[in-house]
Image (tube, rainbow, N blue to C red):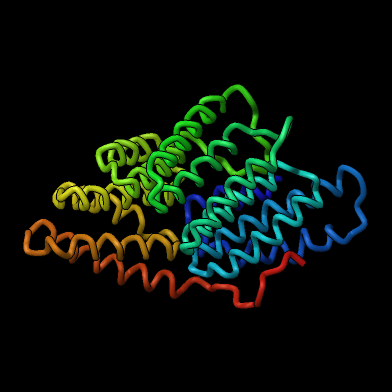
Amino acid sequence: MAAVESFRAADRQLGGGHLYASVLHYLHHTLGPRVFGGETGRDSARTFQAAAALTEMAGWMAHDTGQNRRAGDHFTKALSLAKAGEDQALGANIMASMSHLALQMGHLDKAVSMARAGRDHVTGGSRVPTLIARLHAMEARALAQLGEGETARRALTVAQKEIAKMSDIPSSPWVSSFDMPALASEMALSLQDAGDLPAAVEAAEEAIALRSGDRARSRVFSQITLALIRTRRGEPEAACEVGRALLGECMTLGSLRITQQLDLLGHALARYRAEPIVRDFLDCLAETRRQRALLLAGIATPTAAGGAVI
């Protein structure tokens, strides 16, 4: 458990690119032998649970470095390990990750079905409110992109009600953290896709205000979201103000997804380049993009196929 938490904390602060190889090494050389080491009973279950949680994390790190196919392989293996460890909440958590990946790859119907399957997967004592909230939020993201705005809003309302219960019921130690800032971030994206830009701005600003400094990558994603929404609203100066704040914060993050989102922001603002404040920001963005390219080029990315636990 300590190793999982250490990797998780470092990933949130540094980005997956810096840690992916280390996580795979730990899975292969530390947890892998224990999975086949003949442990029985509770120790065996906890080993499978730890392997599942860390394999899911490896999937997110692969996704963060632009390797979505490998990320999917990791998530599939993680789900099998969670079943072997008889942990329903962990399995549902992995399904939420699979829903996110499907959404990012444009498989919207699959994203909806995985989120709903995750909710069906948890029953009774394994029902964790923060996890249920995350699954509803993922469903809302996909529904909004499918053009089902009202249904998406209803899913977000349920997610808000579930997240309010987080202080009453303890979360599973293996389930990824999903808190108010995380929900606000997902709401901003859903509301943007549903066309409710004022509400999307409010949610994005809430996500930034609530997100602490130990979650640097999440904070930067929320800042980029806010800048993109401001741009869509025809507020390029406000977008550039947010953008300047995030450029310094994103410099050391080993995340290709951050770079891709910065590219989207640059493309969105290009139409306003005639304005001096936008032109200056785009020049700064281009320099940040060059420096981040050097950073990501210097990160060793595992190349072995599959990335199996053992």
Residue at 53% x, 67% y is 68
Residue at 33% x, 41% y is 204
Residue at 64% x, 33% y is 128
Compared with residue 54, is residue 206 higher up or lower down, i.e. above or below?
A: above
Q: Quarter-wise, where is residue 59 in the image?
A: bottom right
Where is residue 38 shown, x and y percent of the image? 93, 57
Q: How many marks?
A: 0
- Left or right for 146, reference 127: left
- Left or right for 310, reference 240: right
- Left or right for 96, reference 256: right
Where is residue 241 shown, x and y percent of the image? 19, 48
Is residue 212 visible from the viewing direction of this image? no
Where is residue 63 shown, x and y percent of the image? 52, 63
- Judging depth in this view, the residue of 280 and 269 nearest the camera is 269
Is residue 206 visible from the viewing direction of this image? yes
Where is residue 244 shown, x and y percent of the image? 23, 53
Residue at 66% x, 45% y is 92
Position of the C terminus by quadrant: bottom right
Q: Quarter-wise, where is residue 275 in the image?
A: bottom left
- Judging depth in this view, the residue of 124 and 16 nearest the camera is 124
- Left or right for 278, reference 172: left
Position of the N terminus by quadrant: top right
